[in-house]
Image (spheres, rainbow, N blue to C red):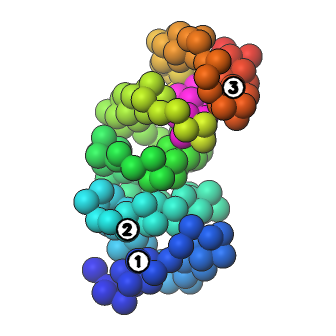
Amino acid sequence: MNVDYYKKIANSSAHRKSRDENKDFIFEHPEYLSDLVEIAFDTNDKNHHKACWILELICEEQINLFKPFIIDYCNSLKKFKSESAIRSISKIGMFIVNDKSIELDNEQEEQIIETFLDWLIQTDKAANAAYSMRALYQLGKKHSWVNEELKTLLQRDCNDQTPGYKFAVKDILKRL
């Protein structure tokens, strides 16, 4: 791990400008992507959530750069506990399952399904839930039981949820 690059991540912030600068740095220096992924997937690292934020932007623009790390991504999913990291990691999962050029094997799909269902049940953060349910909906096209489970989860009482959460639920239920 490059110490100077680690300091760059550690000194970054949630501001979009900071995240964009770090994303652009990776686009200019892709050899540092493995360091970024290592930081992001080390949930014991106090800066892993910052690396997740940057990784999310990279995957949003150039998911192909992330393809070599999909196995590591799937194997790391269960370790994420920080809501801030889960937001980015669930969004990355949504990008992965929506990208037609990425073929997940059954184990990887199961890892995403299991983790995202858990996150959907456990979170009350609208963004985390929305990205999880959208990824699950996509995987449910291949695994019908997923959409049945998703429908059951989404039809539960959500009166105490935020307007953003309610909107995402309504949108997915219409599609189901």
Left or right of 51: which side holds 72?
left
Q: Amino acid at mark 2?
A: Asn
Residue type beneath disc 3: Lys
Quarter of the image with the N terminus is: bottom left
Q: Is residue 102 visible?
A: no
Relative side of 54 to 38, left or right: right
Label 1 with label 2: CB-CB less than 8 Å = yes
Label 1 to label 2: alpha-carbon separation: 6 Å
State the residue at coordinates (55%, 38%).
Answer: 125
User: Compared to 65, does 156 lie above or below?
Assistant: above
Our reading of the magenta stretch's main secondary structure is helix
Q: Quadrant of residue 122?
A: top left
Upstream in sequence: badge 3 or badge 2: 2
Q: Which residue is mark 2?
A: 47
Q: Which region of the structure is painted magenta? A: 128-137
Q: Amino acid at mark 1?
A: Ala
Q: CA distance from mark 3 to mark 2?
A: 31 Å
SS for callout 2: loop
Residue 166 tag number: 3
